[in-house]
Amino acid sequence: MKRVLIVEDDSQMATMLVESVTQEGWSASHAENGIEALRACESEAPDAIVMDIILPEKEGIETIIEIRGRWPKLPIVAISGGGRGVGVDYLDIAAKVGANHTLAKPFDVDDLVELLRGYLEES
Amino acid sequence: MRSTISAVLQVALPYLAFGVIWILVSDRVVNQMEAGGIIDSAASAQTVKGIVYVVLSTALVATLVLVAFRAFALQTHRLQATLEATSAGLLEADLRHGGEYGSPEILSMLGFDPNTIGDLTTFLRGRLHPDDRNALDEALSDVEDRSRVRRLRVLDAHGEWRQLHLQGGIVERDREGKPAVFRAVLLDMTEIRQLEREVRKFRKLESLGALANGVAHDFNNILGSAQGFARLVRRRTTDELTLTHLDGLDRAHRRGRELAAQIQEFGRSGPTRVERVELGKIVEDTLKLLQGSTPDTVRLEGQVDDDCPAVRANASQLQRILMNLALNGVRSMDRSGGVLRIDARPLDTDGYQAAYLRIQDTGLGMDAATLRSAFEPYFSTRGASTGIGLGLAMVNGIVEAFEGQIEVDSRVGEGTTFSITLPAFSNERPSQPEPST
């Protein structure tokens, strides 16, 4: 069974994403921050990652850079509801540091599922 | 007084010393000259003594005076250079005899010709802000605190308030201890005050922008998860009524989405770099962008005068407000059709250059009540399903941030015209009167 790691600090959002992924017949695990995400990458070897950017501990951007360094081919979809600062597009930065695709919240979950399907069928 | 005495002594003492030395040695010198055959009689010896004395003492005094004068000139020059370099002015008043001195810098900092004004204190008093008159009087009588800085607002030659700092007080008293001489330095702080105001405004906008972004971020998370859950329900149900209710939920999501997007837009409209912006290109780009979302019944027109000055603004923000206003216009002509026209021309008010930008439509127009609330946040004429009402509030905020003005004129059934005045890039930074301190 294909494994998707959901990295998201908002618990409602995380529950919804885990549920949506599970309904597609994939297994889903959840990490609340970048540190947990890296640990999960080691222990669970996911086939794709859905990564929120603004996280309480170890930001998404930093985590993407680290994952790219260690797992160059692991597909990452970065999601964000916009930055807290002014004039910074975090999704732009995420794409530059190696996210395969970006989605701005609130996005259509169908779009996310289709993206994941593409990555998971490739792998 | 003390410096005058010492200057006199500096010349007088060496002169006296030379006189004494000459009395002591002149006999011997003349004797030597007789012995050497340079002079030959007692009578001419007296003449020689006198001539040598006059020549040497004159040369000595001339040298001493010259040295003292050069030292004095150097000191004066240094003081003058300091005043010029710091644009500081010196103000001095003799309180016993009523004389006064003001360095020319005081008048030049106010934009007046120093040669045309006679009585400086009276002149200054006449142009002083009414609330600051006490501050000047206090300084003129303050014996205690010479280091205190007093803020004075003075009306300059262009009719604008300049912020001066006056530091000084009574520097000399008479024998009875009464104030005798007042001396103070005047500094022009207008530009520094202006910069401080800009920094404060920038910080305020920055924190507002950060707040808006934070709210939008949380909002997007909530909307995203709600929308996702609704999708999960939709996949599990075939019940007609549940599906109808889910459609209602979707409509609510769309509204929430638009609101979050507008809040985010508002957050982005915070502080931005102010640059030189040519209106021709902006208007052209806006019209191009509009073409895609304009029905065939609406004609788009644009005209920017060749002599229209470049403005002090930000290109992408200006584009955003033009798009916002133009789209409003196009929407109001959805059914009727009409003309949307954007034009720009130069505006010159007493040498102050500006650009006058108009966005006109021939659509529905607004009544007086709507017009009054048009720029208020969260006010919208469109139904609750599409309008959020942050658009015009944002436009207003951006225009104000560029120190421009926006006006709206509208008639029901005839159309609406938005007029924006933006300062030209070539202007000096406009300084505004500070309301109060």
Image (cartoon, coloured by chain):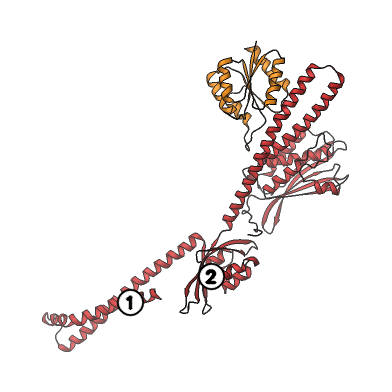
Chain colours: A orange, B red
| Residue at the farthest top position | A1
Give the left or right position of residue A75, taking residue B414 as reference.
Answer: left
| Total marks placed | 2
Position in image of residue B333 (x %, y %): 84, 38
Give the quarter of the image for residue A34: top right
Is label 1 or label 2 in front?
A: 2
In the image: residue B178, left or right of residue B412: left
In the rendered structure, the residue with mark 2 lies on which chain? B
Quick one: quadrant of the C terminus of chain B? bottom right
Task: Classify B248 as above or below B345.
Answer: above
Nearest the viewer among B239 and B13 is B239
The residue singled out by tag 2 in the image is: B142
Residue A1 spot, x, y in % from top left: 65, 10
- Chain bearing mark 1: B
In terms of secondary structure, where does tag 1 sit? Answer: helix
Residue B115 point in image, percent of width and height: 55, 71
N-term-proximal mark, 1 vs 2: 1
Q: Secondary structure at mark 2?
A: loop
Does residue B271 show up? Answer: no
Q: Mark 1 — residue? A: B9
Please tell me in which quadrant of the rendered image residue B106 appears.
bottom right
Tell me which amino acid carries mark 1: Leu
Inter-mark Cα distance, 1 to 2: 35 Å
The answer to whether marks 1 and 2 sit on the same chain is yes
Q: Is B234 in front, or is B403?
A: B234
